[in-house]
Image (cartoon, rainbow, N blue to C red):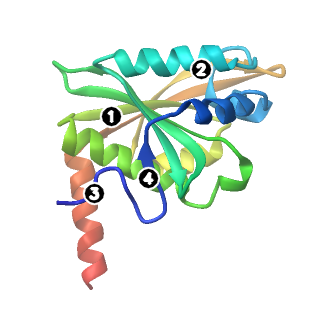
Amino acid sequence: MKAILHGHRVRLGPVTDEHLEQISTWFNHSLFLRRFDAAAAQPRSYDSLKQWRDDTGESDNSFLFSICDGESLIGYVELDGILWNQRNGWVGIAIGDADHQGKGYGSEAMELLINYAFDELNLHRLQLTVFEYNQPALWLYEKLGFTYEGAQREFILRDGEAYDMFIYGLLAREWRGRNEKNAEEELE
């Protein structure tokens, strides 16, 4: 059996109270906030983050994991809005500090989350939204095999400019086919 929450460099685990302290600092950075959410950028308190974490933990259609490299918190991934009868869910990722971005941690964490969603939870489809100006996230999702499915035009208004919000989806059979192809290429 393969490890479902541990990769080569990162592991997914619970979001602890200490993690919430660090996550609250990320919500003070405008770039983080503007890539993360369409809502107006505003800091989040420890208490509001604790409520979010606790609500997610009590929900039967949401899963929240910390992303750690050793003992250091790098970010978090979330699988939520699961419609069990349709076997669909939404995924999201946040890598907090710029020092950890663009180094493959997010890719590995998302691979773990996708495997968890398809292999452990037996979901059929994953979906996400991403703003057109978030190029690092677009590269990540396309690298992972997510397919562009459409856009909500001029959804986001930031600094006097209008931006689209893209919708991406990934089916379990596409993910498994991609993994089989990658395994075959590694054998060659």
Q: Which residue is mark 2?
A: 49
Q: Earlier in the sequence, mark 2 or mark 3?
A: 3
Query: Real-space Cα distance between discs 3 and 4?
Result: 10 Å
Is residue 23 among the parts visible in the rendering?
A: yes
The amino acid pointed to by label 1 is: Leu
Query: Real-space Cα distance between discs 2 and 3?
Result: 28 Å
Farthest-out residue, bottom: 188
Left or right of 88 in this view: 130: right
Q: Which mark is residue 126?
A: 1
Q: Earlier in the sequence, mark 4 or mark 1?
A: 4
Query: Real-space Cα distance between discs 1 and 2?
Result: 24 Å
The amino acid pointed to by label 4 is: Arg
- Around disc 3, counting alpha carbons within 10 Å, would you say few (fewer than 14), some (14 to 19), or many (20 or more)? few
Measured as percent of width and height from the top left, residue 86 is found at 19, 21
Q: Nearer the viewer, mark 4 or mark 1?
A: 4
User: Which corner quadrant of the image does residue 133 belong to?
Assistant: top right
Q: Which residue is mark 3?
A: 3
Q: Which residue is mark 4?
A: 11
Secondary element at image label 1: strand
Q: Residue at x 75, y 17 (%)?
A: 42
Q: Residue at x 54, y 56 (%)?
A: 69
Secondary element at image label 3: loop
